[in-house]
Amino acid sequence: MTYRRLGIRWALLMALTWAPFAAPIAHAEPFVYCSEASPEGFNPALFIANTTFDASSRNVFNRLVEFERGSTRLRPALAESWTISPDGLVYTFTLRRNVAFHTSKSFTPSRPMNADDVLYTFLRQWDPNHRDHKLSGGSYEYFNSMDMPKLIKAIEKIDDHTVRFVLTQPEAPFLANLAMDFASIQSAEYADAMHAAGTPEKIDLEPIGTGPFQLVRYQKDSIIRYQAHPGYWEGKAPIDQLIFSITPDGSVAYAKLKAGECHLIPYPNEADLDAMRRDPALRVMSQEGLNVGYLAFNTEKKPFDDMRVRRALNMAIDRDAIIEAVYLGNARRAKNPIPPTMWSYNDAVEDYPYDPEAAKAAGGGWLPERVRDRFMGPAGQAPLQSGRPADGGNDPGRLAEDRGEDQDHFLRIRRIPEADEERRTPDDAVRLDRRQWRSGQLSLRPAELRGGERRRQPCALVQPGVR
Amino acid sequence: MLSFLLNRLALLLPTLIGITFFTFILVHLMPGDPIEMLMPERGIDPERHAQLRAELGLDQPLLVQYVRYLKQLAHGDFGRSIVTKKPVLEEFATVFPATVELSVAAVSFAILLGLPIGVFAALNRGGLFDYAAMSVSLTGYSMPIFWWGLLLILLFSVQLGWTPVSGRIGIFYDVPPITGLLLIDTALEGDVAAFTSAVHHLVLPAVVLGTIPLATIARMTRSAMLEVLNTEYIRTARAKGLSPVRVVGVHALRNALIPVVTVVGLAVGVLLAGAILTETVFSWPGVGKWLVDAVNRRDFPVLRGGILLVAVTVVAVNLLVDLVYGLLDPRIRKAT
């Protein structure tokens, strides 16, 4: 099962002014979205940041299949329909006809989207010998991270409107993977035209897609301008001009919202939420985020190899206090490693209550005072925190690090970069690890679990972005 | 004058090499792995990690990396951003004009207000204006830029609606970049409304960024003026019966300006540091914001190249200040 980053900026907390709703937006009036950071670029296959996807794949491009807004259910997009062979190895897609690509100053498409475009999109990422594989740095980390290079055996064009993917092994999440941003369909004709013009790098800088909006101009770190794609296959968007006004600071974004300089801001500061909710001119929209924060035990190391100790710690942590103090109430207790928005969420799992006395008893007398103080202490110091992604607020362990080191090194809290995790040896003394996955994919296939992950069992979950 | 200039230029080379060394070391001492920033949540396998490290040259010993970097620099190559894959110099060229515009506006604000305040405070030494100006400037000097910026935004943009909250120009104006300096570009386009909008957007950030230099200049001018006003030649000038305006404006101010010019030169460094905060508050697409993004993304080449280019700018401005200093004070040119 693979889950994708589900349009989290639309799905998480956001605030918007009533103004555009009180009166229908005049067509000449641009809709201004105060985005939280600058995009890395405009070809979603080359990058990984949500900000980049917001600015490229979600409005400029389409994929063969897409997620229904606000859910993880799939819907047909550039592929009208598909079939999967009984052995799960062959996926055949029938492409939608008469899907128009954008027209720009340097490119006018001569034909609608067809199988060549699908092949170009995937072969560029998959085939190291493809003409454009090395273009723009040629690093396709999302594609690689989804194991696509090993998973795909062949990509074939059956006819102009039929494409076949042959896999090396059955892969349940394959279809969902194709709905992810890196699989946004590019124009093969545009690529050829840019090569002929001697400016191949333009393919990635001045994107041509099939999406509802086309890029007009990007002023670095400042403004991204889009205009509605008149020939959009789902019908022209009701907004003529879309503007991303890049505003990294949450307080400033809120000020802009109040001053009417933007219509919509994502990721408001949690501290501003109450004031926003009280303001009749603003509307706060919130939805459960695709994210879970948790502590992970190293079950191969003492004392966490003992189930009673793990259970004791679970009961010793006052998660409601953490939610109030750190997330200012904008989260809820999680009892699973995945949030309820996903179909595989198991509601039957029973949550651990916060019960210090029971924790003492359950720990078999293990839970020493020091450790208890650490987890039962003032909730504001609890080793969990959240924040605006652009601020790096979700930096794991930042708060924990502030708390310094235990005198006898019994419980030493330190930050270990993700990358080092790859190099961690089984002898590494990491016993308890505060982690968070956010709006990303969570693979539960046992074959995929690396040594490091197998050791961890999630507990003490907090699910932010929920009220 | 020529030998003075050559002397100063000769000193530049070791300074620049020193800067390359320190920026390189500092950037590499920073915790975090740039490849970590390139990875999706699900991570990448160790082989790909190693492959990427090799591609970026990060698998080599630091010294080898440094020598390679120097070789690149000697060819005018500042490297490419790990994230955007664009040449660092090209990215710098797009963000630098915004910072120049902001800094020039801030310095102009600081000088235009700071000089007269300093002069008047000196002339009214011990008076009400002197005390008021000096206490206000002390407050200005200790003002946290981020907080000051937000405060001004809340008052002037949100409450009074006089100025826009952030950005460089109204979203309705799509001015194609010619020089990158919006005031000049809009003027060249002959678009009065766009020019006005750009000025409106510039006011608050320039005031915020100019606050600390303003306080410094005002205090410096005051003390320099006080010193000069007590000298023999000013007494002589007064005794000759020259008008007070001429005594202060010509005889005293010219000499009092020497330390002030130095302060302005040094303030450029402070300005560029302050620009990082100011640009973040006002979503100003300049060098400061670009570097902060690079830190967050562990974009080593951008950080190395960006800091180096900023350092070169500061060094160049200081060189210019030395030259102006020489112009103002003949003793300095003769001494070298």
Image (spheres, coloured by chain):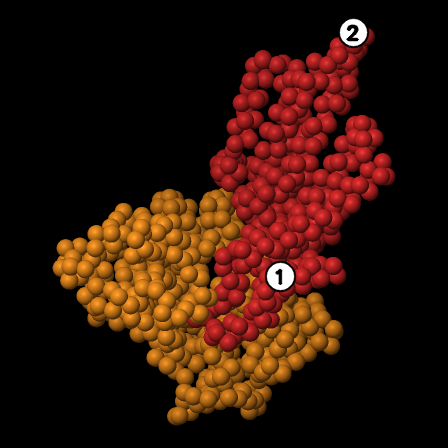
Chain colours: A orange, B red
Q: Can you see residue A82?
A: yes
Give the answer, above or below, for where A74 lies relative to A229. below
Q: Can you see residue B171?
A: no
Q: Which is in the foreground here, disc 1 or disc 2?
A: 1
Q: Quadrant of residue A305?
A: bottom left
Percent across and percent down for residue A283 are 40, 51
Give the answer, above or below, for where B241 lies relative to B181. above
Which chain hosts label 2? B
Q: Which mark is residue B63?
A: 1
On the picture, is B11 further left or further right than B56? right
Q: Identify the mark nearer the N-term, 1 or 2.
A: 1
Q: Residue at x 37, y 75 (%)?
A: A451
Query: Nearest the camera: B233 or A273?
Result: B233
Categorize mark 2 by other alpha carbons within 10 Å: few (<14), some (14-19), many (20+): few
Query: Nearest the camera: B260 or B157?
Result: B260
Percent across and percent down for residue B11 are 75, 44
> Which element type, helix, strand or loop, lies under badge 2?
helix
Q: Which mark is residue B259?
A: none
Say what amino acid the circle numbered 1 marks.
Leu
Disc 1/disc 2 C-alpha distance (Å): 67 Å
Percent across and percent down for residue B25 are 59, 55
Q: Residue at x 67, y 69 (%)?
A: A202
Q: Which residue is mark 2?
A: B239
Say what amino acid the circle numbered 2 marks.
Ala
